[in-house]
Image (tube, rainbow, N blue to C red):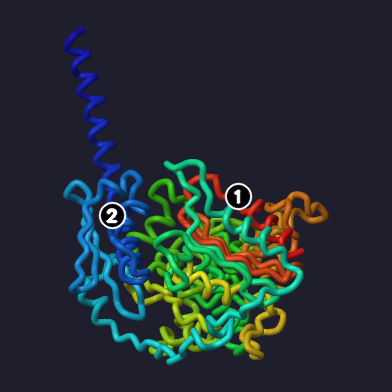
């Protein structure tokens, strides 16, 4: 009997060791890849102190167990966990941070990339929104005390261990910047990560191609991997990708190793990885939020625009026209912008992006997005049963004939927004002439966007 028990215990121990090794083999490279990318972007793009980043973004398990080394000579970050899963992210001026995955670092550094020249503009002497000069007086009709209280409340947190984490708030009413506030260590010059708000930037770039008659969103998506005869994925249109109804077999789960985490932190060509996935559902039938769809759209933009103009295109045709001079799109190792997740901009520049959409795609008297594009963007996908999604933007429509089912019950149903991980938001409320930006690091439910927005609306109503 004793020998049998020993054999059982040995077998259990062996299974535990195998499971533990497998978990580490799969999970460690994702964790160290995430850590390297975040620290590299935060130091070299956002200009933040590495100790502050470790104490905030990287303070959670297993990220706080990782060994981080910042090299200020070659602008890179290397990571490892318990001596394993060594990863590296590099910073290149004008391109932000890139995680080295699958491709050799030398090949990535040697990529011939033409960057858009940054316009020489003294924004402090130019009136908002193209510049940062603000009027001395506030607009009539605004309850300034109530507005300040609403903004201040977004920074208050009773839980010291799990703070609300708001870093920046900007409120634009009727085109005018009427309120803003920043947490200690952050200013109007600080670039902050948009995470999945990048998807909404991808929407704008697709819209520009439509305006230029270079893309038909109702036609089959021009994805080379899907063009073989009898490939069911050839039925996927660009509109399906925009509406998150492609039907691709792609798992969007950040709590474990999934298609999304492998794509972002282990793949050198993210779009190629997603394009290789099989079809799971009939295109257009099921709404499933997928960063993979957005990265396929990003590669489509690259192939339509073509190199070497591709890396200039977002800046020349979008950011610089809006006065978004801080904006940075970051590419994967293959050189394609990570159109699902990797962008940085100041809070004011995120507000400028919102103004483009509240003004129906027109900015500084120039039509940047095609006529009707914003209306299409804010029309719910038929497969989104709660009316919650359009073209790479979240909506507040609610179920058909039941607007009370909307996500933000105290906010008008015409509100739509760019939304990102940890509470990154650009809220656009046309009926209230409002664009509200909220950026932060929120990992709990203390940030109630519904209350935050409704309080601001009350102050301007």
Residue at figure coordinates x 66%, y 67% from the top left: 428
Q: Which residue is mark 2?
A: 32
Residue 306 at x, y percent in the picture: 44, 87
Q: Which residue is mark 1?
A: 448
Say left or right for 53 vs 368: left
Residue 333 at x, y percent in the picture: 32, 72
Label 1: few (<14), some or many (≥20) within 10 Å?
Answer: few
Label 2: few (<14), some or many (≥20) within 10 Å?
Answer: many
Foreground residue, 460 or 255? 460
> Helix, strand, or loop for circle 2?
helix
Q: Earlier in the sequence, mark 1 or mark 2?
A: 2
Residue at figure coordinates x 22%, y 72% from the top left: 105
In the rendered image, is residue 240 in sight?
no
Residue at figure coordinates x 60%, y 72% from the top left: 237
> Image quadrant for the N terminus?
top left
Residue 454 lies, with reference to residue 220, above or below; the image says above
C-alpha span from label 1 to label 2: 31 Å
């Amino acid at each position: 009997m004793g020998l049998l028990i020993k054999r059982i215990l040995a077998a259990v121990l062996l299974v535990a060791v195998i499971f533990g090794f497998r978990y580490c083999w799969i999970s460690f490279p994702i964790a160290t890849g995430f850590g390297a990318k975040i620290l590299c972007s935060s130091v070299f793009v956002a200009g933040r102190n590495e100790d502050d980043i470790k104490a905030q973004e990287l303070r959670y398990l297993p990220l706080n167990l990782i060994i981080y080394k910042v090299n200020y000579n070659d602008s890179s970050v290397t990571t490892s966990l318990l001596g394993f899963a060594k990863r590296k992210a590099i910073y290149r001026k004008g391109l932000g941070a890139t995680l080295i995955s699958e491709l050799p670092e030398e090949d990535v550094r040697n990529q011939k990339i033409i960057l858009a020249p940054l316009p020489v503009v003294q924004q402090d002497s130019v009136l908002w929104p193209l510049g940062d000069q603000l009027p001395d007086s506030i607009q009539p009709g605004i309850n300034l005390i109530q507005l300040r209280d609403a903004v201040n409340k977004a920074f208050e947190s009773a839980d010291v261990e799990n703070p609300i984490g708001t870093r920046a708030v900007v409120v634009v009413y009727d085109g005018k910047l009427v309120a803003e506030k920043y947490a200690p260590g952050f200013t109007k010059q600080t670039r902050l990560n948009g995470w999945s708000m990048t998807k909404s930037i991808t929407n704008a770039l697709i819209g520009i191609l439509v305006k230029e008659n270079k893309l038909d969103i109702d036609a089959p998506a021009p994805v080379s991997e899907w063009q073989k005869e009898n490939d069911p994925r050839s039925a996927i249109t660009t509109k399906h990708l925009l509406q998150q109804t492609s039907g691709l077999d792609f798992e969007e789960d950040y709590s474990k190793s999934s298609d999304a985490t492998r794509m972002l932190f282990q793949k050198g060509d993210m779009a190629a990885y997603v394009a290789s996935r099989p079809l799971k559902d009939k295109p257009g039938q099921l709404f499933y939020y997928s960063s993979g769809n957005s990265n396929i759209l990003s590669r489509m933009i690259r192939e339509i625009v073509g190199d070497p103009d591709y890396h200039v295109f977002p800046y020349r045709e979008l950011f610089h026209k809006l006065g978004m001079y801080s904006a940075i799109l970051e590419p994967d190792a293959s050189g394609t912008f990570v159109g699902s997740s990797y962008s940085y901009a100041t809070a004011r520049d995120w507000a400028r992006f919102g103004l483009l959409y509240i003004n129906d795609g027109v900015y500084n008297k120039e039509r940047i997005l095609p006529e009707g594009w914003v209306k299409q963007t804010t029309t719910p996908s038929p497969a989104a049963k709660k009316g919650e999604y359009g073209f790479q933007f979240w909506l507040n429509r609610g179920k058909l004939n039941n607007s009370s089912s909307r996500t933000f019950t105290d906010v008008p149903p015409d509100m739509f927004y760019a939304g990102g991980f940890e509470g990154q938001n650009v809220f656009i409320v046309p009926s209230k002439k409002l664009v509200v930006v909220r950026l932060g690091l929120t990992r709990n439910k203390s940030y109630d966007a519904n209350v935050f927005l409704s309080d601001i609306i009350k102050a301007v109503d």
